[in-house]
Image: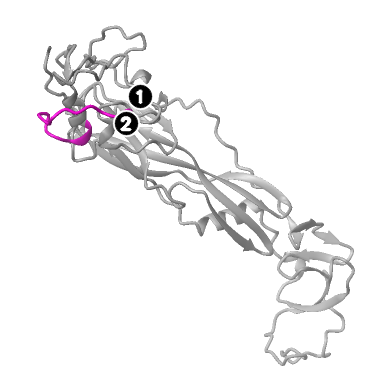
């Protein structure tokens, strides 16, 4: 790939690269984006010539002259956000805390067995392990002696004891209570709550916006477009499974961007680009491509945004955190070398 070295680049080139305008567009004096102090490698102070002194190559931390030769496929100095190699994320993975299977009464954990029998979350009582003898109604004719309901040929009546010693009742069960399913963990119930949230991948915000073409050496901005409760959180839902009620709150922990050139970034919601920012870099989530995309499949880089959600739950007298499967959005962007003017 040919080398490009220059010391004078029209401000219009940077602006055109972000907005997808023709490179002959009129230059204007940009407004600094939030948290960005324009200066150092690029001085936007020449209204007469419209030139800004900029290194076409990736700006170095020391401000020394650099050469863009396409050999750097994703140096951290080209990006804003938390950069890392695609295979190296130094953040420790979050551990799922599913909680303990719990028998509960009014959301208060209680023993799952007692001298009276086995606790049933769905019935709210301890069920005797043996059928009542004699059965209510004597020799049963297949109908409930109290309501006349057809009970079928299987099952029997059992005594059902309140957990606080408040008396006993009668319950019909098709199977002995020892064979009842064990209570779920709160984490299992939390996942039922998450299923109600309809979580979705983010809507990608990127400037320049495809099908506009990005320019080598010109900042690209990345952000979460129109974040809402389903794409970024927080959102809350509750679920009840076999008497265990859990409330879960989900929110995005991070957005991990893959730029297609070997660079990955971890960002928050990011800052949306507006034309007043000109050719300045994003203050919190952006990238500068150092080589064109012509050699990539389809002539474009595939940009992915993977959102990692964290779910905090509370229920059954416990609290914990679980993760859910990441959600991925993607777009494609063409990157070309710009026509520079040497001053």
Question: On the rendered image, what quadrant is the C terminus found in?
Answer: top left
Left/right placement of residue 218 relative to residue 10 reads right
Q: For mark 2, what is the residue?
A: 259
**Stretch of the chain drawn in magenta:** 18-32
Q: Quadrant of residue 310?
A: top right
Name the residue rendered at 75%, 60% in the picture.
Answer: 104
Choose between 1 and 148: the one closer to the eye. 1
Colouring scheme applied when the structure was drawn: one colour
Choose between 240 and 117: the one closer to the eye. 240
Q: Quadrant of residue 68?
A: top left
Task: Give the percent coordinates (x, y) of residue 268.
Answer: 44, 36
Q: Magenta span has 90?
A: no
Q: For mark 1, what is the residue?
A: 79
Q: Determine the CA span between mark 1 and mark 2.
A: 10 Å
Choose between 98 and 5: the one closer to the eye. 5
Q: Magenta span has 24?
A: yes
Left/right placement of residue 11 relative to residue 243 reads left
Task: Give the percent coordinates (x, y) of residue 245.
Answer: 66, 60
> Dots 1 and 2: beta carbons under 8 Å?
yes
User: In the drawing, what numbered circle is on residue 34?
Assistant: none
Q: Earlier in the sequence, mark 1 or mark 2?
A: 1
- Mark in the foreground, 1 or 2: 1
Residue at the front extreme?
Answer: 48
Task: Give the percent coordinates (x, y) of residue 127.
Answer: 81, 70
């Amino acid at each position: 790939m040919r080398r490009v070295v220059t010391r004078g680049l029209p401000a219009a080139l940077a602006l055109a690269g972000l907005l997808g305008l023709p490179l002959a567009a009129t230059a204007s004096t940009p407004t600094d984006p939030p948290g960005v102090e324009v200066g150092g490698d690029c001085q936007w102070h020449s209204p007469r010539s419209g030139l800004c002194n900029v290194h076409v190559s990736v700006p170095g931390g020391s401000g020394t002259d650099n050469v863009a030769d396409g050999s750097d496929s994703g140096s951290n100095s080209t990006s804003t956000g938390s950069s890392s190699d695609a295979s190296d994320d130094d953040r420790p993975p979050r551990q799922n805390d599913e909680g303990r299977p719990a028998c509960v009464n009014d959301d208060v954990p209680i023993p799952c067995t007692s001298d009276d029998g086995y606790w049933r979350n769905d019935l709210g009582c301890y069920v005797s392990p043996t059928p009542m003898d004699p059965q209510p109604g004597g020799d049963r004719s297949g109908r409930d002696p109290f309501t006349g309901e057809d009970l079928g040929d299987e099952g029997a009546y059992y005594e059902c004891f309140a957990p606080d010693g408040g008396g006993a009742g009668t319950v019909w069960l098709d199977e002995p209570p020892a064979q009842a399913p064990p209570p779920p963990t709160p984490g299992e119930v939390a996942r039922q709550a998450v299923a109600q949230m309809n979580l979705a991948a983010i809507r990608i915000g990127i400037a320049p916006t495809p099908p506009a073409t990005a320019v080598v050496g010109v900042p690209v901005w990345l952000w979460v477009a129109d974040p809402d409760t389903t794409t970024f959180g927080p959102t809350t839902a509750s679920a009840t499974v076999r008497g265990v009620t859990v409330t879960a709150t989900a929110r995005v922990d991070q957005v991990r961007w893959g730029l297609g050139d070997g660079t990955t970034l971890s960002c928050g919601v990011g800052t949306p680009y507006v034309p007043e920012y000109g050719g300045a870099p994003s203050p919190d989530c952006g990238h500068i491509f150092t080589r064109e995309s012509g050699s990539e499949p389809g002539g474009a880089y595939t940009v992915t945004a993977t959102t990692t959600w964290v779910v905090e739950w509370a229920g059954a007298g416990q609290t914990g955190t679980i993760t859910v499967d990441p959600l991925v959005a993607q777009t494609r962007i063409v990157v070309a070398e710009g026509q520079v003017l040497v001053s």
